[in-house]
Image (cartoon, grey):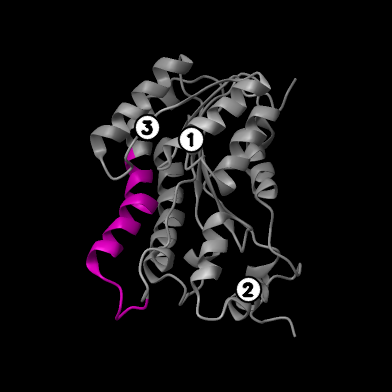
Amino acid sequence: MSQLEGKRILITGAGQGMGHAIALGMAAAGAEAIVVTDVNEANGLAIAQTVNAIGVKATFIKANLRNSSEIQALIEGAVAFMGGLDCVVNNAGVIDSQLIDDATIEGLDEDTWDLVMDVNLKAIWLITKFAAPHLRASGRGATIINSASVAGVNGTKAGVAYGASKAGVIQFTKSSALFLAPDVRVNCYLPGAIETPMALGHIAASSDPEDTVRRMTGAHLLPRMGEPSEVSDLVCFLASDQSSFITGVAIPIDGGMLAWRGLRS
């Protein structure tokens, strides 16, 4: 039996980076059907087509994750397309340092704060809210898997709103696991520095890209950036019945960053 056989899955932020890798990984792991959404419609359509080419039923549904009615329509559309819902991967996210030049506490503006909170945290609540009845009815080992970050555990100068939103994701994950048990397992993953377009954009936007890379990876005990496919492997495990006794946890995938308090010399 394939790892994700029979699973009907919704993935947000699937157009690039970790979301793209997760969609490919879940298709390769034998998912029954996958619905993807992304702010970049062309990227979303492309990954849906790629998943279809692998032999897994897939489609793209456009949705603004800052709009409650569009999120509700996304869930209803996904359920209608797949005939049910077994897994939601809340992967979509934005970081303030890529949205404005001055992402410090003093420089951060209210609109940017609200945007980051809406996409990174509020959307996860709304998706969970609207998906919960369908997941409870799944009967196929329902799961929600949320994208948090090591920035939600440690302070960061790189994205004040981003870090605060990801701390909220960790807490919301635990509360969701409590409220939805035993029907739905809820977990989150905490990436360190992963080689994604968002991370590369953050590096490029910095005043000293070389120093930014050193700071991003210097706390990794494994001296490199992580690969999106490595995150995908973890998410596939959390979505599968292989993790059937795991819920309410925040799992770092960070090269050892949170294991100590230092920088490699």
Reading the image, the residue beneath label 2 is 213
x and y percent of residue 71 in the render? 31, 35
Q: Dot 1 surroundings within 10 Å: few (below 14), some, or many (20 or more)? A: many
- Residue 140, how many percent across, how many down? 56, 21
Q: Are marks 1 and 3 in contact (CB under 8 Å)?
A: yes
Q: Is residue 20 above or below residue 256?
A: above
Q: Secondary structure at mark 2?
A: helix
Can residue 4 be seen? yes
Q: Earlier in the sequence, mark 2 or mark 1?
A: 1
Check residue 85 for magenta coloring.
no
Q: Main secondary structure of the magenta part?
A: helix
The amino acid marked with disc number 2 is Val
Q: Is residue 153 visible?
A: no
Cα–Cα gap, marks 1 and 3: 8 Å
Reading the image, the residue beneath label 1 is 44
Image quadrant where one finds the N terminus: top right
Q: Quadrant of the C terminus?
A: bottom right
Residue at the spot x=46%, y=50% of the render?
174
Q: In 3D space, how far apart are the residues under numbered discs 2 and 3 (Cα atoms)?
A: 34 Å
Residue tagged by mark 3? 62
Boundaries of the magenta span = 104-126
Please provide percent x and percent y for residue 171. 42, 56
